[in-house]
Image (tube, grey):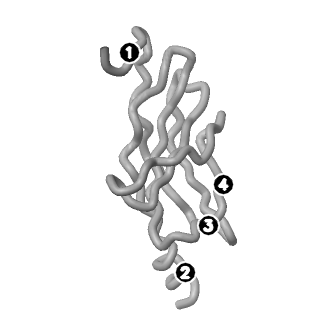
Amino acid sequence: MGGSVTLGSALREVERVSCVAEPGAWRVSWSPLDGAEAYEVQQTTSIGQFPWLLVATVSGNELRMPSALAEEVWIRVRAVSVTGAGPWSDPVLIRTRQASARMVA
């Protein structure tokens, strides 16, 4: 059989994922979900070309992560509970070169 489904795992998709530039880092945040015990955050430099890598598992609805070395980084988040994990959020694109240009201008 394919992927497992746990009855009662009614976690919804994480919404309002956003990234804000801070000195030397990005603050990634999202809307908290009822029933979520933790959140998994993944990143990739190219959707479909490179795999998604787990950045962190956090208990709150915010993560401060070092600025990426790549020019573009995609981030996605999902809620996790004892009954299973919810669906991944829509990916959010961080463009580091564009952010740097804005700070200089």
- Tell me residue 30's x, y (percent): 51, 45
Q: Which mark is residue 100?
A: 2
Q: Residue drawn at (60%, 62%), measured in percent from left and top? A: 26
- Mark 3: which amino acid? Ser
- Mark 2: which amino acid? Ser
Q: Which SS class for mark 2?
A: helix
Q: Which SS class for mark 4?
A: strand
Q: Which residue is mark 4?
A: 64
Q: Which residue is mark 1?
A: 5
- Tell me residue 96's x, y (percent): 51, 73
Up-down relation of residue 5 to residue 63 (above or below)? above
Q: Which residue is mark 3?
A: 67
Characterize the local packing of mark 2: few (<14), some (14-19) or many (20 or more) Cα atoms within 10 angstroms.
Answer: few
- Mark 4: which amino acid? Arg
**Which is more N-terminal, label 2 or label 1?**
1
Q: Which one is nearer the viewer's eye here, 18 or 25? A: 25
The answer to whether the residues at label 3 and label 2 have Cβ atoms under 8 Å apart is: no
The image quadrant where one finds the N terminus is top left
Residue 7 shown left or right of residue 18 in the figure: left
Cα separation, mark 4 vs mark 1, equals 31 Å
Which of the two marks, 3 or 4, is nearer to us in this view? 3
Res 41 → quadrant: top right
